Image: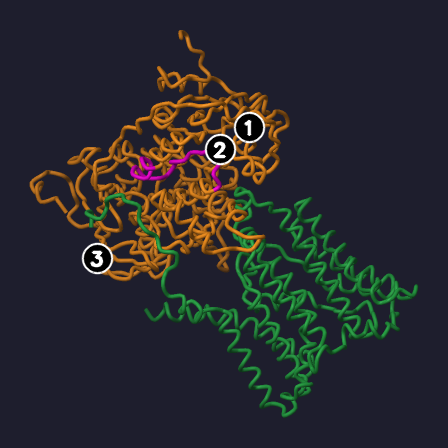
Chain colours: A green, B orange
């Protein structure tokens, strides 16, 4: 043993062997299996499920939420959270509806929707990064603030009468059954996946979530990265507001009610650690598919909405608890 | 094992060990942390466990306290085999540990910390507060600690927290006390108090496992020793039978130069000038110059403001006044990112919190500040990253299973190497090392010193904050002594003595030059 102790530079391999085993044990694979099972269950449950137009319809259950979930995933990986996203959607939608009264056209409406989203994100970001307040508290506050503004403007009224070309953003199809929203979802998933997993910025996001102090001590501009993430989350909420308003064709102050929890659920179900530091966009995409299919499948069976939330809640707890349960059982057997 | 020679020695070794480990093996993915380790602890005796960082000491402590399960081997208490599937099981069997950084709860009172998990219960199963406070007072008095059991732990210093940890050990009627570098954060006076306490525990018949890197204290309080090297037990015996040099050789497996590396000063042009640096509370009026290839030591007592100043120089905090020139040009440093961009890097004292991102792989830690160089228009290039990380890891003789291993799985000395590699990869002009060898073993220490000398010879300027006088004297070309946030004295290496340093740091005026 001591003969090998001569201090010559040792070669250190890049990676340990066993990459295959790591993929087999990954969260994404487990989630994918669940997605397939739910898909099969849906085909058994209803003969109409496999119809292409039905499947296409099913995607509307998750596309808008998933757009926000991508940005939220980055924010949660960096150790922050934004619970005001549904409030931002309401305020952005209200602003568009208000502008509509002055005859603003589709490009103007889109600009206003995205602009309000960015402004709300900036407001959250400044409070968190400049004043150093905890994001969960700030965004619980702005959640009520943004939606409250929407209630003040609208009361129990609604804005209607969006133009047809605007409605295309929520109801239009690009080719055959591929809707504009579905295409947008795919493009955004690719962009966010690339940003998180293949860029320096993405590496900084993971680093900050693991240890913000050491990240700062390593020369990363922690506050700037977080500010960008809040802006992105606001912007994505603005995009979701445009799509949702276009699809519904009207704005009520209760629009996108309780979406923030569904979006956070989607992110966590996708394997993003709520404590920050780990996760993947692929996981969030599969989680979006799972949640969308469950909602749609139960809808085909005429199951009431409350049962759907019970099912989603149970699924979340089950998927999080199962791997840990297996680990405990394995240890108990030794 | 080599105790065959002293069979007839009249040493009062109790016939039966309280705790005996045999054939303990523990492997982690890619690393064998312990293989076939033997250890016996006897009542009323202090056994010193020595070994370099990464020799397996911490793994053993975790097995003893039920945090890790061994893959193979037996644990016996009083001759009967036992398992510690949980930390509670170990504690119930009478094994308790006092860690380097005490695992206590700042928001609870002294008494609550002492009795956490086994508080005396009154009616309805509620905590018997009066009984608990009285019991805590009793134990504290027994160990000579003048603490109020109702004080919140937050208000205590590190030394007092150690006393609370020890009181906790006594409250669960521990028979085996594991002390993992208990003196690492203590002052000299506090260390003396700890020694007395260890003597008291000994006379109470406790078996003590004492882990330390400091040989003076091992020879002061230990009765026996056990040496670990690369996860194996290489020797054990009585302290009286070995010398310090023999012990070091056993640890390292070769003779270690206690002499610092030979350096010839080839100091070049001025590279860094600090003028009038001040902070509202931490330091004031800091002026000095640093030359290319120079090692400048910063000595002072704990709390003299050295680390605070260095962190301001690195842009973590902002100075209220003062200017920095690099290569003669004024440099504004408002954030670590700016400091790095201008060639100043900082290896912090607190590795775990400020230095390494322990959950992330080695290569990602190393390339973190150099991503701009390894990437193309913002996109990662893994091949370049691995190449850069390999260059610096191998240069620092890093011991790791693979470059994608999380840094947290490495020993303290190797984590420090990762942090240093991270900064060298940025090709800095000035590297600030804050207590670079604190808590790392003799072998790694010598390696860090040799490396520091090598860097200086290549023209890198080094600022070394250290509280160890031999290190300051052995490595520095010049020494600045800080006291109460100000520069108290500046010395050249020639003719500098420990006495001069201590006087300057403590504020005594020198009578004659």
Chain hosting mark 2: B
Residue at left offset 66%, top offset 81%: A296
Q: Which mark is residue B23?
A: 3
The answer to which of marks 2 and 1 sits earlier in the sequence is 1
Q: Write the start and end of the magenta stretch as one range.
A: B426-447
**Image-based side of A300 in relation to B160, left or right:** right
Reading the image, the residue beneath label 2 is B429
Residue under numbered circle 1: B326
Q: Are marks 2 and 3 on the same chain?
A: yes
In the picture, the disc for residue B493 is none
CA distance for labels 2 and 1: 9 Å
* Residue at point 23%, 54% (across, down): B21
* Marked residue chain, label 3: B
Name the mark nearer the viewer: 2 or 3: 2
The spot of residue A309 in percent (x, y) is 65, 75
Instruction: Give the number of the mark in front: 3 or 1.
Output: 1
What crowding class fits label 1: few (fewer than 14 Cα within 10 Å), some (14-19), or many (20 or more)? Answer: some
- A27 or B244: nearer the viewer: A27
Left or right: B311 as drawn, with respect to B135 = right
C-alpha span from label 3 to label 1: 57 Å
Q: Dividing the picture into quarters, in which one does residue B167 lie?
A: top left
């Amino acid at each position: 043993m001591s003969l090998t102790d001569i201090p010559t530079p040792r070669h250190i391999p890049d990676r340990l062997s066993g990459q295959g085993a790591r993929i087999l044990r990954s969260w994404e694979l487990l989630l994918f299996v669940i997605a397939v099972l739910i898909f099969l269950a849906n085909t058994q449950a209803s003969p109409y499920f496999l119809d292409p137009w039905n499947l296409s319809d099913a995607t509307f259950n998750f596309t808008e939420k998933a757009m926000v979930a991508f940005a939220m995933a980055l924010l949660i990986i960096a150790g922050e959270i934004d619970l005001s996203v549904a409030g931002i959607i309401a305020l952005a939608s209200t602003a568009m509806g208000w502008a509509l009264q002055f005859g603003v056209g589709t490009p103007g409406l889109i600009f206003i929707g995205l602009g309000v989203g960015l402004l709300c994100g900036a407001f959250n970001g400044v409070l968190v990064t400049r004043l150093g307040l905890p994001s969960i508290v700030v965004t619980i506050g702005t959640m009520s603030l943004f939606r409250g503004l929407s209630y003040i403007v609208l009361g129990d009224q609604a804005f209607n009468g969006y133009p047809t070309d605007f409605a295309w953003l929520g109801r239009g199809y690009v080719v055959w059954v591929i809707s504009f929203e579905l295409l947008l979802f795919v493009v955004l998933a690719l962009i966010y996946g690339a940003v998180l997993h293949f860029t320096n910025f993405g590496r900084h996001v993971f680093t900050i979530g693991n240890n913000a102090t050491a990240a700062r001590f390593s020369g990363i501009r922690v506050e700037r990265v977080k500010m960008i993430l809040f802006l992105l989350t606001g912007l994505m909420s603005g995009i979701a507001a445009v799509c949702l308003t276009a699809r519904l064709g009207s704005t009520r102050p209760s629009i996108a009610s309780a979406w923030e929890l569904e979006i956070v659920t989607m992110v966590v179900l996708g394997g993003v650690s709520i404590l920050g530091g780990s996760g993947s966009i692929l996981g969030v995409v599969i989680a979006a598919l799972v949640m969308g299919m469950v909602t749609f499948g139960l809808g085909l069976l005429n199951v009431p909405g409350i049962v759907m939330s019970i099912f989603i809640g149970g699924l979340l707890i089950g998927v999080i608890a199962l791997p840990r349960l297996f680990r405990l059982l394995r240890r108990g057997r030794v | 094992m080599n105790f065959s020679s002293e069979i007839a020695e009249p040493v009062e070794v109790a016939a039966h060990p309280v705790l005996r480990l045999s054939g303990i093996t523990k492997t982690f993915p890619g690393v064998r942390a312990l293989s076939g380790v033997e250890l016996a602890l006897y009542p009323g005796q202090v056994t010193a466990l020595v070994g370099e960082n990464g020799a397996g000491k911490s793994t053993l402590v975790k097995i003893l306290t039920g945090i890790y399960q061994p893959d193979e081997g037996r644990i016996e208490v009083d001759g009967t085999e036992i398992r510690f599937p949980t930390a509670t099981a170990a504690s119930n069997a009478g094994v308790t540990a006092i860690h380097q950084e005490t695992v206590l709860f700042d928001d609870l009172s002294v008494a609550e910390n002492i009795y956490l998990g086994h508080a005396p219960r009154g009616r309805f199963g509620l905590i018997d507060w009066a009984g608990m406070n009285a019991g805590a007072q009793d134990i504290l008095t027994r160990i000579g600690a003048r603490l109020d059991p109702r004080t919140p732990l937050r208000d205590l210093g590190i030394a007092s927290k150690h006393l609370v940890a020890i009181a906790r050990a006594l409250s669960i009627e521990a028979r085996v006390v594991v002390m993992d570098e208990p003196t690492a954060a203590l002052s000299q006076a506090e260390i003396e108090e700890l020694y007395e306490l260890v003597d008291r525990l000994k006379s109470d018949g406790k078996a003590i496992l004492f882990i330390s890197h400091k040989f003076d204290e091992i020879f002061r309080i230990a009765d026996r020793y056990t040496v670990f090297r690369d996860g194996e037990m290489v020797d054990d015996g009585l302290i009286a039978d070995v010398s310090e040099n023999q012990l070091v050789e056993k640890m390292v497996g070769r003779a270690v130069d206690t002499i610092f590396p030979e350096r010839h000063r080839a100091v070049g042009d001025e590279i860094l000038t600090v003028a009038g640096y001040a902070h509202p509370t931490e330091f004031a009026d800091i002026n000095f110059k640093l030359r290319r290839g120079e090692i400048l030591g910063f000595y002072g007592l704990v709390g003299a403001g050295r680390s605070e100043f260095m962190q301001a120089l690195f842009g973590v905090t902002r100075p209220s006044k003062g200017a920095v020139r690099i290569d003669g040009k004024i440099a504004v440093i408002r954030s670590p990112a700016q400091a790095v961009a201008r060639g100043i890097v900082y290896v912090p004292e607190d590795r775990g919190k400020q230095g390494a991102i322990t959950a992330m792989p080695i290569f990602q830690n190393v390339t973190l500040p150099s991503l701009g160089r390894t990437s193309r228009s913002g996109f990662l290039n893994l091949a370049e990253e691995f190449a850069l990380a390999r260059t610096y890891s191998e240069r620092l003789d890093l011991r790791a299973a693979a470059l994608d291993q999380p840094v947290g799985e490495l020993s303290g000395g190797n984590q420090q190497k990762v942090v240093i590699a991270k900064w060298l990869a940025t090709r800095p002009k000035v590297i600030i090392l804050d207590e670079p060898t604190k808590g790392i073993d003799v072998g790694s220490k010598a390696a860090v010193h040799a490396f520091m000398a090598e860097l200086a010879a290549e023209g890198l300027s080094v600022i070394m904050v250290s509280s160890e006088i031999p290190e300051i004297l052995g490595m520095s070309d010049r020494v600045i002594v800080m006291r109460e946030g100000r520069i108290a004295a500046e010395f050249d290496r020639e003719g500098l003595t420990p006495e001069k340093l201590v006087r300057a740091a403590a504020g005594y005026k020198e009578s004659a030059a």
